[in-house]
Image (cartoon, rainbow, N blue to C red):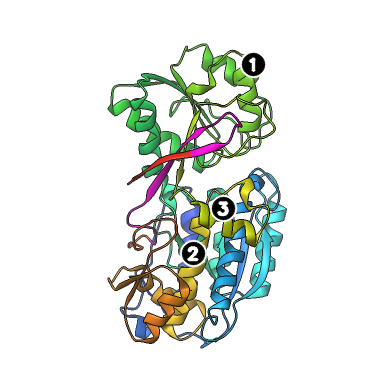
Amino acid sequence: MKKFSHRATSGLALAAGAALLLSGCTTSSGDSADSAESATGSGEQVLKIGTLLPQTGSLEHLIYGPQAAVKLAVSEINEAGGVLGNDIEVVVEANEHDPTDPTIMNKSVDEIIKAKPAFVLGAMGTGNTNAAMPKVTEAGILMGSPSNTGIALAGVNDLYFRTIASDIIQGRALGNLVLQDGNTSVAVLTQNNDYGKGLRDNLQTTLEDAGAEVVYGAKGSGEEFPEAQTTFSSEVTAALAKKPDAVAMVSYVEAKQAIPELAAQGFDLSKLYLVDGNTVPYPEFDAGLLEGAQGTTPGRTVDADFEKALVAASSDASKSLNFAPEAYDAVMLVALAAQKGGAADTETIVANLHAVSGSDGGETCSTFKDCAALLDDGKDIHYEGRAGGGPLNEDNEPSTALIGLYKYDAENTPQPVGEIEG
């Protein structure tokens, strides 16, 4: 478990900034204290949190699940008596947008720092987290993402954690899904950012290790497309000219334009494979267009009861449930860490985050009410979250993780068909 002192915070910020500027290099603090008891915080008794989610931009279609999950988690915690007897306060809801307009991100970061939360959920996009992290970390605010899968973020600093698996696991799962269907040649339509290339690289490794070939969009080919691109005629033409058995698309909202182009050029969309950034319902497409297509999403599939609770918290939740379990778990872990540590400041939360995730063992519990009762009795706990991830490891990410498998029905809606653990 990583801890830090107040003096170490500025050093961590500088380390984070340097790591991000070096595009892909990572660092972790070696100046941490050795025990939770050594952490010295402000003693704040009211947990103040914020969000950094995509209200606009190429990830806007994924905001609904996390947004609902935050509302649901906060509501449940407050109804159970709150953290340290006080209601959680959501003090800022900032817009991460996307890298096409950094002025929005800069404004959002300023809003977060001004609001002084102990914790901010987000950003959703790996690139957006890279952009926000230096200033947020320097301000001593903990970031926790429900959706960052970029490999380089593993252990980047003590003021960042995630409740989702990295692209190493999803890339492997997607590759095995493609292979088990008997495909030996694959075209990959990949967006040109850390998320796209990282997931593509791990997919490619899995395919090639099994003797399959990436015939378009391979690492080093220079065939990635820019984020937020809206037309895909040339990319689809070039990919299909290679006569692939299957097409995998690693993207965000860009899939809305690429999928109709694939269909227009005669590709059998039951041989299309999607990922967490685009495995969402497509009600705007003709019925049956995507029937049989498949996708992967890190995390446990959302069951009917949890979906009902999410929709009750926010009626838009059903538009996309992606990353809702991970967002819910992030808020719960932060709240329980504050409860265990006896204060709601960032340092206390960080010092206790691993412990409540189960890194030190403890009694299993799955609700704030039950977990808080165990903590009040002086017991160690293992919060068993909605996403099904294992306790946080030394890189501040789940030690084990689930990948959900989906197949599209005649209404162009992804239906869960299973999950695997990685």
Q: Is residue 147 visible?
A: no
Residue 264 lies in what quarter of the image?
A: top right
Q: What residue range appears in magenta?
A: 396-415
Which image quadrant is residue 44 in?
bottom right
Give the crowd class for mark 1: few <14, some 14-19, many >=20 residues within 10 Å. few
Numbered disc 1: secondary structure: helix
Say if 407 sits above or below 165 in the image: above
Question: Tag 2 or tag 1, which sits nearer the N-term?
Answer: 1
Q: Nearer the viewer, mark 3 or mark 2?
A: 2
- Does dot 2 land on a helix, a strand or a loop? helix
Going by the numbered disc 1, the residue's amino acid type is: Ala
- First along the sequence among labels 3 and 2: 3
Instruction: Check if residue 412 falls in the magenta segment.
Output: yes
- Residue 315: percent from left, percent from top: 68, 55
Which residue is label 2 attached to?
A: 330
Left or right: where 125 falls relative to 55? left
* Disc 3 target residue: 124
Q: Quadrant of the N terminus?
A: bottom left
Pick the front one: 238 or 13 = 238
Rendered residue at 42%/83% (across/down) = 341
Residue sitting at 44 percent across and 53 percent down?
164
Residue type of the residue flagged with mark 3: Met
CA gap, disc 1 and disc 2: 41 Å
Q: Which residue is mark 1?
A: 264
